Image: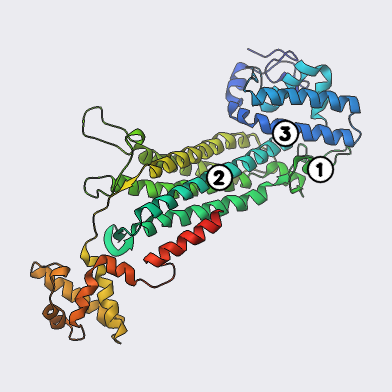
Amino acid sequence: MTGTPATGGRGARMWGGRFSEGPDRILWSFTVDHSDRRLLRDDLTGSLAHVAMLGEAGLLSGEEVNTLTEGLAAIVTEADRNTFRFLQGDEDVHSAVERRLGELVGEVAGKLHTGRSRNDQVALDLRLYLLRSTGARIDGLRRFCLAMMEAAEEVGDTVVAGYTHLQQAQAVPLAHHLLAYVSTALRDIERFEDVGRRLDVSPLGAGALGGSSLPLDPDRSAELLGMAGRFVNSMDAVAARDHVSEYAFACTQALVHLSRLATECVLWTTTEFGWVTFSDALTTGSSAMPHKKNPDIAELTRGRAATAIGYLTGLMALQKGLPMTYNRDLQEDKAALFAIDDALAGALEAMTALIGSAEFHPPPPDPSVTALDLAEILVERGVPFREAHHAVGALLATLAAEGKTLPEATAADLVKVDPRFEPGDLSLTDPAGSVGRRLSTGGAGFASVQEQLRILERRLS
């Protein structure tokens, strides 16, 4: 089964002249990918700039520029109203726009492709899409940061155990723990800001790979698009996809950070931890067990981070063996890219809502989290840290053998282990007091939390 040339048949409009028959159904079904349809608005933006440049370069008459611009503007309206119709015979978003433009303005639509290839066209569309998406993901990360900061302020001076190896380690303010995720999200924002600078380069004018004999003006095209500059090498302009994988990495790394928080949310809702309760509206139940309340948002965030890692690996592998310049393999980048981008957009919205619904009620940490305080008081008295560490370890072992906890220790217990302990050192075994004594900049002290909030508010403003 083949298409019908020049009548909206499969693929005939953009490349059918060389061929005596239209594409076979098998070729069409295997090679056509509709995932690029979300680039419609970006393709129109690029086409409007291209038409304006062609007019200024004398390649289109004023009347042709006006006709094409009015037709493209009408399609923009359809796109904005979600009334633009893709047809089965549209090979990709570019051919769909040109087909619709022909319906609106007639044969002059064929001049839209003057001095342009689908190679530089899709390269531009992707860059415009990613620039838009970069701004959207930064906004989403900022909303997430603000939700985490609000949660940190609400828990106030609540003290919990900080963990290493999932074992209680030191007493920390819960707010300090929550704000750690704001620090990770700020780095994610910086990554998006950084990749945005490399995205802001127009490939329009590179053509298929080697530019054009027509008097195109790529600098003017970039200016009309509001982009920072244009390509330096036309072959690189159409072949490069490192900006796609770099953007995908920024998304995936942000998802990995969210996944770590998601894991803690799952742990914190368990009976064993009992740190937090999330809104009924943002949790699910069990079809069999009436008592269950499941943090599905957190679990799915972890799952989508895993999927994104797979897609990112695919994007890297996709590029590794390609000769210059464009190869059809690169069509596969869009489905992977959009899947990663959608995963982050959805996870940010869902996790921000989940944290916004949280009611924190953590139990107090085990007093053993003050062990380092006992070692450091000996250090202040001139004891080498390794000796102090050994003394406190011996104290805890002795108490455990006697069935006693650290708060049950006596002055005699301290002195028996190391005579350099003093009776007043028993006051160091209060977790809240341990946090209150924390002095180091950026550490887990109450004053540090307030300073962090001030720094973060300035950064996010």
Q: Nearer the viewer, residue 368 or 361?
A: 361
Residue 389, image quadrant: bottom left
Residue 6, image quadrant: top right
Q: CA distance from mark 2 to mark 1?
A: 31 Å
Secondary structure under tag 1 reads helix
Name the N-terminal-most of marks 2 and 1: 2
- What's the residue at 74%, 49% (across, down)? 228
Q: Position of residue 146 (x, y in %)?
A: 47, 49
Q: CA distance from mark 3 to mark 1?
A: 15 Å
Q: Residues within 10 Å of mark 1 (few under 14, many from 20)?
A: many
Q: Amino acid at mark 3?
A: Thr
Q: CA distance from mark 3 to mark 2?
A: 22 Å
Q: Name the residue that disc number 3 marks.
A: 45
Q: Amino acid at mark 1?
A: Pro
Q: Nearer the viewer, mark 3 or mark 2?
A: 2
Q: Position of residue 305 (x, y in %)?
A: 44, 43
Name the N-terminal-most of marks 3 and 2: 3
Q: Position of residue 408 (x, y in %)?
A: 13, 69
Q: Residues within 10 Å of mark 3 (few under 14, many from 20)?
A: some
The image's mark for residue 139 is 2
Q: Is residue 377 above or below residue 163?
A: below
**Residue 389 as seen in the image, left or right of residue 185:** left
Q: Is residue 123 visible?
A: yes
Q: Name the residue that disc number 1 marks.
A: 218
Q: Position of residue 353 (x, y in %)?
A: 42, 40
Name the N-terminal-most of marks 3 and 1: 3
Secondary structure under tag 3 reads helix
Q: Nearer the viewer, mark 3 or mark 1?
A: 3
